[in-house]
Image (cartoon, rainbow, N blue to C red):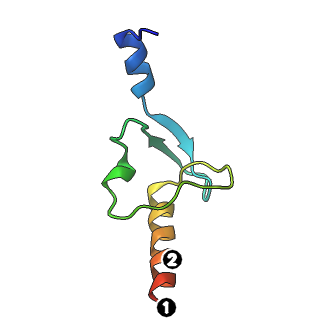
Amino acid sequence: MDLSSTDRSEQASPRRLACTACGSEFSCSLTGSCWCSDESFRLPMPSDGGDCLCPACLRKLAEQQAAVSDT
């Protein structure tokens, strides 16, 4: 299948999501240039069928998991 440059730019457009934890809206880019790729921590993708978390909720969850692993 041959993708035109228009098709590729459409695929690279960020998704507008609502955070599964707090409901706030944010952008998510699946191209590898998403805001979350700049974070210093990595969390597994949700296994419950949920979607991404907003920056604030992702950082809060990472802090909680770090505190649990420190004990």
Q: Report the amino acid beneath label 1.
A: Thr
- Label 2 sits on a secondary structure element that is helix
User: Circle 1: is it few (<14), some (14-19), or many (20+) Cα within 10 Å?
Assistant: few
Rendered residue at 33%/41% (across/down): 33
Q: Is residue 38 above or below residue 40?
A: above
Rendered residue at 53%/54% (across/down): 53
Marks 2/1: CA distance?
11 Å
Give the number of marks.
Answer: 2
Q: Report the amino acid beneath label 2.
A: Gln
Q: Residue beneath label 2, please?
A: 64
Rendered residue at 37%/20% (across/down): 9
Which circle's residue, 2 or 1, is located before the other in the chain? 2
Please, which residue is most extreme toward the front here?
A: 1
- Label 1 sits on a secondary structure element that is loop
Residue 37 versus residue 16: which sits nearer the camera?
37
Rendered residue at 59%/48% (across/down): 51
Q: Is residue 59 above or below residue 45?
A: below
Left or right position of 22 against 27: right
Q: Position of residue 31 (x, y in %)?
A: 38, 35
Q: Position of residue 60 (x, y in %)?
A: 48, 69
Specify the label residue 48 is tagged with: none
Left or right position of 58 against 34: right
Q: Residue beneath label 1, please?
A: 71
Please, which residue is most extreme toward the bottom here?
A: 71
State the image quarter where residue 59 is shown. bottom left
